[in-house]
Image (cartoon, rainbow, N blue to C red):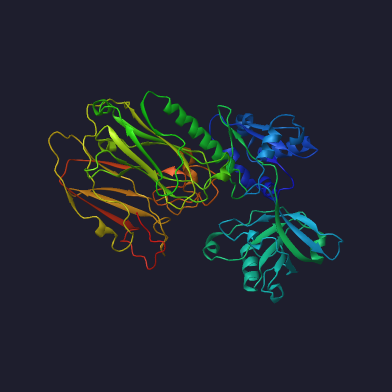
Amino acid sequence: MVYNKHSAFLETLWNSNEALKPFILDTTPNVNYVFIPTDDNAVDEAKWLQSRIRSQTSTDIWEKIENKFHFVVQPVFQLGNWLPACLKEWRCVDHGCGLNQVLIHSNSLEYPFVLKRIDARYDWLPSPVKFGNKTLPLVFAEDGCQENSSVAGAIALVSDVGCNFYTKILMMAKSSALGVLIYVSPGHQLKDMNCEDEDCLNPIDIPASMVPFSPFLFRSWSVQFQTSSSDNFYMAIDSLGRLNEVGWLLYPSASFIVWQAQWMAFKERLERKLQQKSKVVSLFENAIMQGKPGVLVNVTLPPLEELRNFSKFELHADLSCPGTKDTTCPHWDRTIGLHVCCDPKSPLCGMELGRWISPFRRRIGSWLTDVSPLLPLLSTRQCTFHMYTDPWASPWKPSVNLRFSKSEKPSDIYPAEAQVLYQPGATFDHNYNRHFKPYFFNVSKEHTKVVIYAVITGHGSDDNNCGEFCVTSHHFIINGKEHSIKFNNAGTPLGCAKQVPEGVVPNEHGTWLYGRDGWCDGQQGAPVVSFCHAGQYAKTVGLWGLTLPHPWKNYPPPHM
């Protein structure tokens, strides 16, 4: 991680105790953090960086963890190796990288001057990027804690003292200001501007940024928002010496650096698993998936008698994209499905074998999903596999393998038969549960176990934040006995970020942090497997909270 004093984002991060705490709290094994200064006086800058992290914990704890922190005493431009070239090749203007600035014209100066700026949290207020390269009037409005008609149609310049950020920005919005520029008083530090508690429930639709103090601000008459590209501030190297991009830091916090380290530890564990003995059938590798065709392949499987010797059936999927950097990946998160047909006359033809949600513009996704109960979908040796996403989406490059192996506890039984209970795609409204009719089935004496296998992910939006961000529960009732799953993670601020150690792609170029209803961006759709006694009658019920779903409006329609 590089420290550049011209970055308001980095200055805010390093001056915040809360933002640095994740470095101390991180327990990821075998991780080293390296910090590189850019200033001519690199030794002093390195000592200051060390003191900021050291100050976050006690002496006893520091002595146990200090070996994972490394502070370089030469600036980047004096390293004399490949690092400066790599940082320059990966130069950026994105969240947490690049130099956000304001260009200000002042009556006191012959020429305009530039100040670094830190914008309010991306999920609270809109970005000043909306202004483009327009030159906007700048009007001083004291502390901004009261309405002020003079700022109408202008950027309001206010101090950081007095009321809180929310009140300042709200008062300026009520005064018809275009945006707010908050300057810090002498001796104060730049801060991460975010709403708190109930204030977050009342949206404000104008941007706000913070800049350092300058005496010339008070005689200024116009402002222009700009971003100057910079060499990258971040890179990662895995245990095999491979370079990794770190992605977007959406706000000033070391959490994003730690999440990247956690994901690399996950990837290392995954690669060890993939080295274990398995029968591997490759479906495709780095295939281009785009449009309605997606990726369609015909595959000859091993003899079915051989596959039945294995008790575990897994899908290994990697998701990359054309080009060599994250910025060449598609912008949006979309559902990706892998479907299989081994017998065109079978009701199992075209059933979903695996589901994933693509990340926002990152190329590192890698997941291993246990789909053992779906082995009966492979009913003949000649099978067609079809992977696709929305036809309008930009191209991805997936790779998928089928993996067959023996479980740790060998068993004489194997998945022998599959029946389709319900088709996916039901709209999550007051008619939702009508989609799931009672299902009657018989179990022969040859079968010793019955399981329910379901992949449930909620999408769309309504006035209850369903189905993406609302908590739902799903109840399967077999012969009167209930098996249920509840997605409590939905709508939580860091619900998906906390799942990075389990494979969620970190630092995506979008709102990946929030918990979703049964899924996360950059993760596989996790199967729900319930073991139940042999039965003859099954039904299912889906609930929002403790009630049936009942949206008043829904666009796009919430669905499961």
Picture quarter with the N terminus: top right
Tell me residue 246's x, y (percent).
Answer: 59, 40
* Figure check: 437 above or below 378: below
Left-right relation of 273 to 98: left
What x and y, as percent, mark residue 222?
A: 76, 66
| Residue placed most toward the observer, 60 or 315 | 315
Q: Is 257 left, or right, of 230 in this rendering?
A: left
In this rendering, does residue 394 appear at all? yes
Q: Tell me: 11 left or right of 24.
A: right
Image-quadrant location for residue 5? top right
Q: Nearer the viewer, residue 382 or 45?
A: 382
Query: Which quadrant of the figure contains the C terminus?
Result: bottom left
Q: How many marks?
A: 0
Image position of 141 with respect to 438: above or below = below
* Residue farthest along the bottom direction in this orientation: 149
Displayed quadrant of residue 261: top right
Q: What is the quadrant of residue 72 in the picture?
A: top right
- Looking at the image, which residue is at 21% across and 34% down? 416
Residue 372 position (above or below residue 255): above
Q: Is residue 525 visible?
A: no
Seen as rendered, the residue at the extreme left is 445
Q: Foreground: 490 or 527?
A: 527
The residue drawn where x is 60% and y is 56% is 121
The image shows residue 132 at horizontal and vertical percentages of 67, 60
- Say left or right for 165 vs 312: right
Q: Residue furthest top?
A: 277
